[in-house]
Amino acid sequence: MMLAFPPFGLLIGGNAVAQPAPDVAALQALGKHVFFDRISNPPRQACADCHVPATGWSSGVNAGLNVHGVGQVGADPSEVGGRKVPSNAYASFKPDFNTPPPGALFSTCLPGPPFGIPLAPFCFGGVFWDGRAEGEGNNFGAGIPSVGHEVFIDLPGDYQTEYEHFLGPLADQFLGPFTESGPEQNVPANPGIEDVESAIGVCEHVASAQYAPLFEAAWGEPINCTPDDGDPTSHEPGATRSFKRIAVAGSAYQHTDEVNQFSSKRDMALADDNDGHFPLDDFTDEENLGHDLFYNIESELNPDPDGDGPLEHSQAGCVACHNSGPSFFGFVRPPGTEASVGEEPKQVYMDFAYHNLGLPPNPEISLFDPNNPDRGLCGHTGDAGLFAGLCMHFATPTLRNVGAQVGNGTPRAFMHNGYFKSLEQVIHFYNTAEAKLSCEDDLGLDGLSAAEAIANNCWPEPELEVGNEARGGLFGNLGLTEAEEAALVAYLETLTDTELKDVKKPRPHTGR
């Protein structure tokens, strides 16, 4: 299933080279080389050092990282991030920020119709925990420039036709880490580059790399790192445009089936099943039960307790947010269609929206400041006036590869702040967040880890109390038994791609 990048270019009659044409394979190969190249200052960090394929395209196997700080160490080892590295797998399915995906009722991150207020569960799209890599056409002052159609200036129209779908949040995201100081790649800024800092540094690194010919193969012209005025609409090619074209290549690689494998036990069991429906023949009873709980499905494994339906117990409701198709929260179903029961081949288990779960703070995370909490979405959109309601909302992560973020006994870490160290803890929080005592108010205990909180049969108060979905009754008092919690964990473990370790750093490019 691993993606193969075929030879690029075309020879006609001896040494005559055909008119340059778009070459998607070369573009994706360029993006993969850049993804694995340590383009940083000092030269010790690549995209793949934070988004490690073998651990689900998220943080690598680092016991200290997951147990304590959670935030990734930057190119400068003295700098550490303040959030867990999100997985970049399946991020190519996300729409532009404030753009509703197919089936959504609407998207309203701006005050306006239909209610005149921004509603975070109906605020879709973008990349990063706070959506600040927005895609073209949106600008909340996030600090990440947009990669737009200026990359196609002076090129034949077929380049835009072939490459346009690689524009969007992923291309924008690719610009950020290279140029950001602190816990990122920290490429030195260059005077005169205002729109995209450090464009010359990144451009010159790629231009001197062994894989540099891939740029010309992909774009039909050599890479150009000459200084420019930072004007993204300029017809004079320079470092800024080359840097943005490199970002498009990075996005193109992240659209491949090497990153988005759909190779999990769930995928294979669904494809091999006799009737193509749950319960799956190749699942255990526990895994099939976990699926039924996830989707609130009454079945032999998950019967209605009193037999009079609908289910009043034995349901988890995970489908409300971890579903990329019609469910009931933020989406509508076309007339005559059934609600999702998780049988879509390309299900990515996220609603592309933002939610406030009322998570406890993680005082061990790097940059933690109890007086300045991580505000999530409103740190991107602003929190003035009506936008204050977006605070503490974070992007719904995909559940694919959620079981891969561990190795050799290394603890896992989940949520944007890494507070939970196991899927068991995550599920127990969803089950009991509102049913348990308050650690602080009822027991007088502060700063407890998830394990300590569970041992004390309590949960800490949220990092910032601005109302949350547990308090709104969406979860937190589900009444699941220990066996049902375990079944949900078992189902989640089936969503990990089986070919992650087959993704290897690309071989040095030979200029073929």
Image (tube, grey):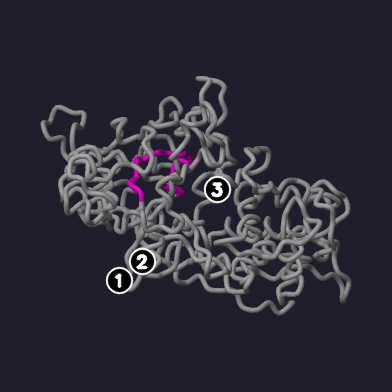
Q: Which residues are magenta?
A: 346-361
Q: Label 2 sits on what residue type?
A: Val
- Whichever of callouts 3 and 1 sits on the residue coming sooner in the sequence is 3
Tell me the residue that label 1 is attached to.
Answer: 409
Residue 127 - label: 3
Name the foreground residue: 447 vs 133: 447
User: What is the chief secondary structure element of the magenta stretch?
Assistant: loop
The residues tagged by marks 3 and 2 sit, at their Cα atoms, a distance apart of: 23 Å
Q: Name the one closer to the observer, 152 or 261.
A: 152
Dot placed on the residue nearer the N-terminal end, 3 or 2: 3
Residue 406's mark? 2
- Tally the numbered discs: 3
Quarter-wise, where is residue 478 in the image?
top left
Q: Residue at x 20, y 45 (%)?
A: 444
State whether residue 505 is above or below residue 337.
below
Q: Nearer the viewer, residue 258 or 399?
A: 399
Q: Residue at x 36, y 63 (%)?
A: 68
- Say whether residue 298 is visible: no
Residue in the picture at 59% in, 41% down:
96
What quarter of the picture does the C terminus occupy?
Answer: bottom right
Labels 2 and 1 touching (C-beta < 8 A): yes
